[in-house]
Image: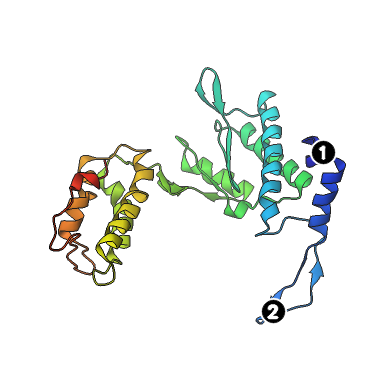
């Protein structure tokens, strides 16, 4: 039905249904597979077709939730006079946000139940969490007990980035710096050439801190701690290895590898 609503023809829908119904699998019991049995419906994990079908299904949830919001049954967060944010989807994660009210919570749970009945995709509430901003913890606990989900406390990580933390404080960047140092602590001087060392440094400095620095303003002391010249001078503390990038040669310009 979802494919038909998006304009796919009957022949294409028949192909998709046949792919879903013709799959077979077995269960591993005591490290031995059982007899194969046939799947008649549902999306299989690891199937390359599942990703595209899942996106279409989530698109239908977006359209349904948008109609509920337009009807005034759910009040989202007003960003400005012309934009209201109520939900965001990324892969198989969904975030719903709105004003704290019993009506909003009731509407959200009703929408998720309707989506489950229509798509046969069950929402795992045990893995879902609720957070209330400027709301007493007693009210949050009351709602979580009613709907059966957990409580989300700040700060927390989402898509590899910390949310709700005071990123203007130096200690908030300790986790990012520790991850960088762990990558560099595995670097043994005897096993890597000069070119390999430079490649590793570029890979670490060019990916891990850049993602966070593109979102948050970085304190100057954190920039000094993640500076290429400082790290190569101090070395890796866990192994107490003195990291010399170029031995018996001219040292490259540190500004080329610094992250600002």
Label 2 to label 1, Cα distance in Å? 39 Å
Of 38 and 156, which appears nearest the observer? 38
Q: Quadrant of the N terminus?
A: top right
Q: Residue at x 64, y 29 (%)?
A: 74
Estimate the x, y position of residue 114 in percent, counting from the top left: 75, 41
| N-term-proximal mark, 2 vs 1 | 1
Q: Is residue 246 left or right of residue 3?
A: left
Give the residue at the far front of this rendering. 249
Q: Is residue 54 visible?
A: yes
Estimate the x, y position of residue 23 in percent, counting from the top left: 78, 63
Instruction: Tell me, for residue 217, which label it has, or none.
Output: none
Of 167 and 140, which appears nearest the observer? 167
Q: Is residue 241 left or right of residue 206?
A: left
Instruction: Tell me, for residue 4, which label it has, or none.
Output: 1
Q: Is residue 178 visible?
A: no
Mark 1 lies on a secondary structure that is helix
Residue at image mark 2: 29
Q: Residue at x 47, y 39 (%)?
A: 136
153 shown above or below 88: below
Estimate the x, y position of residue 251 in percent, counting from the top left: 15, 54
Mark 2 lies on a secondary structure that is strand
Q: Is residue 163 left or right of residue 30?
A: left
Of 160 and 233, which appears nearest the observer? 233
187 shown above or below 160: below
Of 119 and 152, which appears nearest the observer? 119
Q: Are the residues tagged 2 and 1 within 8 Å (C-beta)?
A: no
Instruction: Give the class, few, some or many, for how many residues have Cα within 10 Å of label 2's Cα (few <14, many ≥20).
Output: few
């Amino acid at each position: 039905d979802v494919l038909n609503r998006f304009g796919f023809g009957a022949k294409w829908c028949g192909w998709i249904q046949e792919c879903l119904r013709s799959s077979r699998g077995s269960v591993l019991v005591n490290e031995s597979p059982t007899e194969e049995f046939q799947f008649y419906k549902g999306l299989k994990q690891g199937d390359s077709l599942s990703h595209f079908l899942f996106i279409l299904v989530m698109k239908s949830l977006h359209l349904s939730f948008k109609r509920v919001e337009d009807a005034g049954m759910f009040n989202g967060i007003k960003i400005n006079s012309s934009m209201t944010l109520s939900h965001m989807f990324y892969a198989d994660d969904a975030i719903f946000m709105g004003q704290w009210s019993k009506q909003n919570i009731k509407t959200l749970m009703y929408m998720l139940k309707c989506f489950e009945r229509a798509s046969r995709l069950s929402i795992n509430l045990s893995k879902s969490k609720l957070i209330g901003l400027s709301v007493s913890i007693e009210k949050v606990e009351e709602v979580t007990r009613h709907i059966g989900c957990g409580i989300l406390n700040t700060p927390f990580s989402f898509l590899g980035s910390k949310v709700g933390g005071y990123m203007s404080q130096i200690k908030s960047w300790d986790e990012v710096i520790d991850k960088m140092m762990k990558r560099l602590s595995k670097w043994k001087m005897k096993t890597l050439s000069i070119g390999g060392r430079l490649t590793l440094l570029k890979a670490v400095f060019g990916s891990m801190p850049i993602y966070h620095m593109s979102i948050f303003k970085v304190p100057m002391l954190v920039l000094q701690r993640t500076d290429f010249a400082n790290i190569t001078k101090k070395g890796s503390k866990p192994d107490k290895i003195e990291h010399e990038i170029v031995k018996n040669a001219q040292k490259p310009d540190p500004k080329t590898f610094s992250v600002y």
